[in-house]
């Protein structure tokens, strides 16, 4: 996934109201950027952080900048949660996700479960329908380890339950964690942040829901799917 416009570096002054950030450009101008991330952004929203903004000249958009990347020590983190599905879709359509290569069609936002829409439904090729939910992973509290979630996620727990129900109906179900960080080599659950999600994860895995963790290659020009990363499952 390439950005529509060249990203420009800036300094984060503050994030507020979840979806807004005051930023200082390198020429000294202060601008307001849209933050496409409803989560806590734990560890990514400290004032003074080096960030990257995508400018736009769309007259329909009130804000002319969007915060896309966080940079620390030469490593990038993608803060746009919406980018995760675009990256995964491209990887699925290219048949480049190990374990998810054999199917005929990729459908997005298909209704399922209790008034929900699954991120992707893979069908055909003689196998069972495969329901794929995608979660963007941006938290890291120890070197080399990415964690999910970064805050309590009732919605995420609901998705686990609905994937579990798809398995019970004879389908295949996959929870895919897209790690939007270039400094992590494995993934784990942040069970201390959301114990209910961790418990739901264990139940779903025991019921047959599969888990994949996919890394990314991130630059100020693009976010591309990387290789599969090991996922450390909770004990018990």
Image (cartoon, helix red, strand yellow):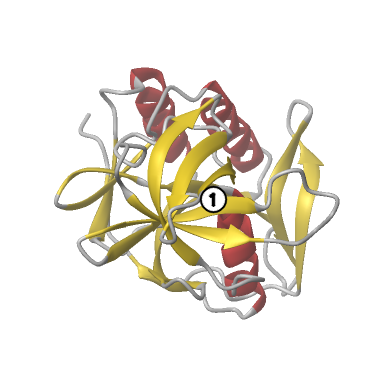
Tell me residue 82's x, y (percent): 61, 50
Q: Quadrant of the N terminus?
A: bottom right
Q: Residue 23 vs residue 38: left or right?
A: left
Q: Residues within 10 Å of mark 1 (few under 14, many from 20)?
A: some
Q: Secondary structure at mark 1?
A: loop
Residue 51 higher or lower than 192, as above or below: below
Tell me residue 54's x, y (percent): 58, 61
Residue 48 higher or lower than 154, as above or below: below
Residue shown at 22%/29% (left/top)? 236
Name the residue carrying label 1.
80
Residue 49 or 197: which is nearer the viewer?
49
Outermost residue to the left: 143
Residue 88 or 55: which is nearer the viewer?
55
Residue 113 or 35: which is nearer the viewer?
35
Residue 73 higher or lower than 140, as above or below: below
Residue shown at 46%/34% (left/top)? 204
Residue shown at 24%/67% (left/top)? 74
Q: Residue 84 vs residue 61: left or right?
A: left
Tell me residue 154's x, y (percent): 53, 21
Residue 230 higher or lower than 134, as above or below: below
Does residue 52 appear anywhere in the picture? yes
Outermost residue to the front: 28
């Amino acid at each position: 996934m390439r950005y529509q416009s060249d990203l420009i570096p800036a300094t984060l002054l503050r994030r507020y109201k979840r979806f807004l950030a005051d930023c200082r450009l390198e020429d000294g101008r202060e601008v307001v950027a849209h933050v496409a991330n409803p989560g806590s952004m734990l560890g990514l929203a400290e004032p003074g952080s080096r960030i990257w903004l995508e400018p736009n000249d769309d007259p329909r958009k009130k804000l002319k900048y969007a915060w896309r990347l966080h940079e620390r020590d030469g490593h990038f983190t993608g803060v746009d949660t919406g980018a995760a599905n675009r990256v995964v879709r491209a990887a699925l359509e290219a048949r480049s996700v190990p374990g998810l290569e054999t199917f005929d069609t990729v459908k997005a936002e298909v209704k399922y479960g209790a008034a929900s829409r699954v991120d992707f439904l893979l069908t055909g090729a003689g196998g069972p329908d495969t329901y794929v939910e995608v979660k963007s992973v941006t938290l890291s509290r120890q070197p080399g380890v990415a964690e999910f979630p970064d805050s309590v996620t009732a919605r995420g727990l609901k998705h686990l339950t609905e994937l579990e129900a798809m398995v019970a109906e004879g389908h295949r179900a996959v929870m895919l964690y897209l790690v939007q960080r270039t400094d992590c080599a494995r993934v784990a659950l942040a069970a201390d942040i959301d114990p209910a999600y961790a418990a739901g994860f264990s139940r779903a895995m025991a019921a047959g829901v599969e888990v994949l963790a996919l890394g990314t290659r991130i630059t100020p020009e693009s976010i591309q799917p990387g290789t599969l990363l090991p996922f450390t499952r909770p004990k018990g």
